[in-house]
Image: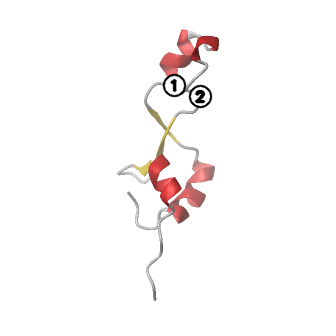
């Protein structure tokens, strides 16, 4: 049986935490930040944990974890 391939696009965007949750960067932080207020920019700093509904789909893209 051949090895399963990791979807490289998902590997660049997601990490799996030690408890098995999905960690990802927050959207809307690249450009046009002048139209966002400082609370939005501050709260979306760093990474966040993904939704439970999306976990199963993304974990299929990452068969060996990361």
Q: How is the model colour-coded?
A: secondary structure
Provide the residue designation for mark 1: 44
The answer to whether the residues at label 2 and label 1 have Cβ atoms under 8 Å apart is yes
The secondary element bearing badge 2 is classed as: loop
Mark seen at residue 56:
none
**Percent of width and height locating residue 64:** 40, 66
Q: Residue at x 54, y 43 (%)?
A: 50
Image quarter in which the C terminus is found: bottom left
Between discs 2 and 1, the one toward the N terminus: 2
**Percent of width and height locating residue 42:** 48, 17
| 48 displayed left or right of 66 | right
Provide the residue designation for mark 2: 28
Q: Residue at x 57, y 23 (%)?
A: 31
Q: Residue furthest front?
A: 31
Label 1: how many residues lie within 10 Å, few (<14), some (14-19) or many (20+)?
Answer: some
Q: Is residue 21 visible to the viewer in this orientation of the structure?
A: no
**Percent of width and height locating residue 36:** 61, 14
Whether residue 15 is situated above or below residue 29 in the rendered picture:
below
Label 2, label 1: how far apart the Cα atoms are: 8 Å
């Amino acid at each position: 049986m051949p090895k399963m391939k990791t979807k490289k696009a998902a590997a660049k965007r997601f990490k799996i935490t030690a408890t098995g949750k999905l960690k990802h960067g927050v959207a809307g932080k690249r450009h046009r930040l002048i139209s966002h207020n400082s609370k939005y920019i501050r709260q979306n700093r760093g990474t966040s944990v993904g939704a439970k509904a999306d976990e199963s789909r993304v974990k299929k893209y990452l068969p060996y974890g990361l």
